[in-house]
Image: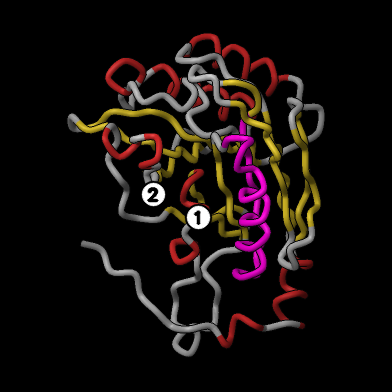
Amino acid sequence: MSSLTFTIIQTGLHWEDRAANLQMLEEKINCIGEKTEVVILPEMFSTGFSMKPEQVAEGMDGEALTWMKRIAAEKKMILTGSLSTKENDRYYNRLVWMLPNGQMGLYDKKHLFAFANEHQHYTSGTKRLIASVKGWRINLMVCYDLRFPIWARHSQQPYDNPALEYDVLIYVANWPEKRSHMWRTLLQARAIENQCFCIGVNRVGNDGNGIYHSGDSMVVNPLGEVLYHKAHDEDIYTITLQKEDLETIREKMPFWKDADAFKILQD
């Protein structure tokens, strides 16, 4: 059985200031003392949760993507977080899974936050991204996706293929403090119902709209037990997860075998 080490960076963000955010985040990454394999940044880490993509979005050869490639290569680690991006005259809230060799996986946020008019500025994604590293499978999602359990469910029909789709579920977010109870509760629910580790990485502090974020970044095990939680303060936290712990829980309590079979149909 293998282990996988993650580092969470819970931080405030400079509003719509890419250069300042990249400098700040690089300083934080340089402060990581432990050996780590995956570093997780919040949603729209280079700009904050801006609804002005025409001003802040960048192409796939832009400054933040170039920065991610350099950091991942220099630190020999995987770097992930979401960005405001532009491609083919459309804007996306796009999560990037950047490998040390410069290869990347991409996930465009499926559920756009209509309450803040995100759907009027960005285009919704249609496909999930499940990355693989060291025998672990990582399901990568963004913020508001957390409210929609079907999007996170293992979609394979259990009687046709008993293998579960993924082992770790990651949400990167800009989730406001006023709804933090929902954030914490849903992270635990997603871990329990999918019998996986669940990691939520949120920002802290006020954004450019005066909305306060309490962070409440968490790591939850497949039983819903909280392995890490931090509210209000900036924090850099490294945790090593054990595949054996996950497999033991799934073998002793194989609730996944009784799951309803379904398929997600796209328009």
Residue 38 appears in the figure: yes
Q: What residue did someone put label 2 on?
A: 111
What amino acid type should be assigned to the residue bearing mark 1?
Arg
Q: Nearer the viewer, residue 127 or 72?
A: 127
* Dots 2, 1 in contact, CB < 8 A: yes
Q: Which residues are magenta?
A: 176-203
Residue lying furthest front in this view? Answer: 178
Residue 100 appears in the figure: no
Which element is circle 1 on?
helix
State which quarter of the image contains the C terminus.
bottom left
Q: Is residue 199 above or below residue 253?
A: above
Horizontal side of residue 160 vs 136, given as left or right: left
Q: Is residue 70 above or below residue 202?
A: above
Residue pictured at 50% horizontal, 15% vertical: 15
What amino acid type should be assigned to the residue bearing mark 2?
His
Q: Residues within 10 Å of mark 1 (few under 14, many from 20)?
A: some
Can you give x and y, in whole percent of width and height, for residue 127 in the image?
A: 34, 55
Q: Is residue 234 above or below residue 21?
A: below
Q: What residue did someone put label 1 on?
A: 147
Q: Nearer the viewer, residue 37 or 230?
A: 230
Residue lying furthest left in this view? Answer: 89
Horizontal side of residue 136 vs 52, given as left or right: right
Q: Which is nearer the N-term, disc 2 or disc 1?
A: 2
The alpha-carbon separation of the residues under discs 2 and 1 comes to 9 Å
- The quadrant in which residue 77 appears is top right
Horizontal side of residue 235 vs 64, given as left or right: right
Residue pictured at 39% horizontal, 35% vertical: 116
- The stretch drawn in magenta includes residue 182: yes
Can you give x and y, in whole percent of width and height, for residue 179 in the image?
A: 60, 43
Can you give x and y, in whole percent of width and height, for residue 178 in the image?
A: 61, 37
- The quadrant in which residue 72 appears is top right
Which element is circle 2 on?
loop
